[in-house]
């Protein structure tokens, strides 16, 4: 799942030399000339060079043609091939041997087999998947790698979104297979414009309050999948909206589970749900609240939806 040491050294030598070349063309960071100096940059300085590289993607071909470092033809071709980069947001869906599966976050949904660099992806984003991340994918010696910058988003994916992502993965595999080489790719799928939401009964989403927006975003499974990022942004910045979200989702899933609970013989029970997850049940509300005190910290208990099964 990771590059070998020789491959890793080659990648960073080429990539940092390319960023030094970008700096020479635009004079973004005074006094910076070599790949060794690029390696010492701060994250913010490095990102300044990255943004300009991907904004002016003719630089890949120009660097290969001018070849200021007198690279071999094979190494110059590697840099030239990076013009086929794919930039955007991806779901890290699963870990496999020899790569991780990245799924593009928008149509056309494609699954990419991406190799890690010096650290495994599990060390960067954790073992609990899926994880949403933003990065740039690059071709490298008939593999796909990322450019060294990986920005994960700390979003929790509920059951409905995970289920939809599994369906998306299946469709991507059926249509494209797992893409393991970008050399033949000539589209930048994640960089395509986000589809414009179709008109709704509300004349404009911009006219809605945050509470109304949240209710619109969670009103259906399709909306929850489409607007998951907007949902997380709303509930991350407003504690009242976060409470509303967990109560609404708990209620929706309780209604889904209700018939099944009755089928297995449950009756006259109090059930606690944390978003889609039933986490405890008891014969009385007081007993359930006592259980929750032992299970969850106070700030999480506030989000729990309590359902009475009659």
Image: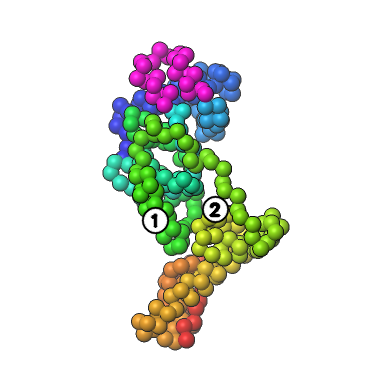
**Residue at which label 2 appears:** 229
Magenta range: 58-81
Residue that sits furthest to the front in the current view: 175
Comparing 85 with 229, the one in front is 85
Assess disc 1: are there few (<14), some (14-19) or many (≥20) residues with their C-alpha within 10 Å of its C-alpha: some
**Magenta stretch holds residue 112:** no
Q: Quadrant of residue 163?
A: bottom left
- Expressed as whole percent of the image width and height from the top left, the position of residue 28 reads 59, 23
Residue 85 placement: quadrant: top left
Query: Furthest-left residue in view?
Result: 97
Q: Is residue 94 above or below residue 243?
A: above
Mostly what secondary structure, the magenta segment? helix
* Residue 149, position as x, y percentages in the image: 46, 37
Of label 1 and label 2, which has the lower sequence position? 1
Q: Which mark is residue 185?
A: none
Relative to 308, say whether 48 is above or below.
above
The image quarter containing residue 137 is: top left
Location of mark 1 (residue): 166
260 w.r.t. 50: above or below: below
- Residue 16 percent location from the top left of the image: 45, 25
Q: CA distance from mark 1 to mark 2?
A: 18 Å
Q: What residue is at 45 percent from the left and 33 percent from the top?
A: 186
State the residue at coordinates (47%, 57%).
156
- Secondary element type, mark 2: helix
Disc nearest the viewer among 1 and 2: 1
Residue at coordinates 57% horizontally, 23% vertically from top-left?
Answer: 29
Residue 115 visible in the displayed image = no
């Amino acid at each position: 799942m990771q590059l070998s040491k020789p491959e890793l050294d080659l990648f960073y030598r080429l990539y940092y030399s390319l960023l030094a070349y970008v700096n020479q063309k635009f004079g973004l960071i005074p006094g910076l000339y070599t790949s060794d100096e690029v390696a010492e940059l701060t994250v913010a300085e490095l990102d300044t060079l990255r943004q300009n590289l991907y904004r002016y993607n003719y630089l890949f071909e120009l660097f290969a043609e001018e070849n200021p470092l007198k690279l071999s033809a094979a190494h110059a071709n590697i840099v030239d091939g990076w013009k086929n980069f794919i930039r955007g947001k991806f779901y890290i869906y699963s870990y496999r041997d020899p790569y991780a599966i990245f799924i593009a976050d928008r149509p056309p949904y494609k699954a990419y087999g991406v190799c890690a660099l010096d650290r495994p992806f599990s060390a960067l984003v954790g073992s609990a998947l899926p994880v949403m991340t933003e990065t740039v994918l690059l071709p490298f010696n008939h593999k796909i790698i990322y450019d060294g910058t990986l920005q994960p988003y700390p979003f929790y994916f509920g059951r409905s979104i995970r289920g939809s992502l599994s369906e998306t993965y299946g469709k991507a595999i059926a249509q494209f297979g797992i893409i393991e080489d970008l050399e033949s790719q000539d589209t930048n799928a994640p960089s395509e414009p986000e589809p414009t939401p179709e008109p709704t009964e509300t004349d404009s989403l911009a006219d809605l309050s945050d509470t109304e927006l949240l209710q619109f975003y969670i009103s259906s499974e399709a909306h929850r999948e489409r607007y998951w990022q907007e949902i997380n942004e709303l509930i991350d910045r407003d504690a009242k909206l976060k409470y509303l979200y967990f109560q609404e989702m708990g209620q929706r899933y309780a209604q889904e589970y209700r018939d099944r609970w009755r089928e297995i013989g449950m009756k006259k029970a109090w059930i606690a749900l944390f978003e889609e997850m039933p986490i405890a049940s008891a014969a009385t509300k007081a007993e359930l609240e006592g259980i929750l005190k032992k299970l969850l910290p106070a700030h999480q208990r506030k989000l729990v939806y309590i359902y009475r099964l009659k």
